[in-house]
Image (cartoon, rainbow, N blue to C red):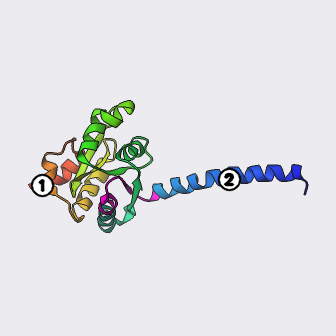
Amino acid sequence: MTTSALLPLGMAGIFLLGHSPYAQWYAYRAKHLVVVTDEERPDAFAVAAAVAKAVASRWPESKAVAAVAKTPAEVVKLLRSGQLQVGLLPPAAARDACAGKGPYASGGKVALRAIAVVKGDLLVVLESFARDKARTLAEAAAGAAGSDPGAVKDPPIPLHPGALDYYGGKRS
């Protein structure tokens, strides 16, 4: 084979390699509920893994798994862009993202809603997250180690309507 014949094959291989991981990632996250947190806090991934395990055990079809991003700001970017659906954030980060303050000012306000409080962190989704799924997620997260149902009475950001459905039913 001549060099001119190999060049198109090499270019095609480069393009296929470049797109393959993205296609796999899109397929993976379409089948799995990914709970993303940040690596800035030493125990954050362990908390996200505990939440994912509790969610997967109570909501098996979610195939929940934990993932980590570098910073809370990156977690918010993943949620805002729709790349991931569920995040675990420190309350101050969730509050600042909702208000569009601090490191979140350039992107504007993010319509985050609280689902649960686990070990002092907020389990959050976007306001557009399906109400029935949010209720199921709140119920499942309540089974996570370190979950604090009492803390959702006064979260620093609004509760998702689906979470309100769950907690309202639990309190009656």
The amino acid type found where label 1 is placed reads: Gly
Q: Residue at x 36, y 66 (%)?
A: 60
Dot 2: few (<14), some (14–19), or many (≥20) neighbours within 10 Å?
few
Q: Which mark is residue 91?
A: none
x and y, in percent, of residue 127 in the image:
31, 41
Dot 1: few (<14), some (14–19), or many (≥20) neighbours within 10 Å?
few
Query: 92 and 55: which one is in front?
Result: 92
x and y, in percent, of residue 117 in the image:
21, 54
Q: Is residue 160 left or right of residue 36?
A: left
| Residue 166, placed above or below residue 110 | below
**Magenta stretch: residue 118 in it?**
no
Q: Residue at x 31, y 38 (%)?
A: 97
Q: Is residue 23 left or right of residue 156?
A: right
Q: Residue at x 80, y 49 (%)?
A: 8
The image quadrant of residue 172 is: bottom left
The numbered mark, 1 or 2, whose residue comes first in the sequence reads 2
x and y, in percent, of residue 147 in the image:
20, 60
State the extent of the magenta-drawn residues as a range. 31-48
Q: Is residue 152 left or right of residue 2?
A: left
SS at circle 1: helix
x and y, in percent, of residue 39 in the image:
37, 55
Q: Residue at x 13, y 48 (%)?
A: 153
Question: Which residue matches tag 1?
Answer: 150
The amino acid type found where label 2 is placed reads: Leu
Q: Is residue 5 left or right of residue 97?
A: right
**Magenta stretch: residue 46 in it?**
yes
The image quadrant of residue 78 is: top left
| Residue 2, placed above or below residue 99 | below
Q: Which mark is residue 16?
A: 2
Marks 1 and 2, how far apart at CA: 50 Å
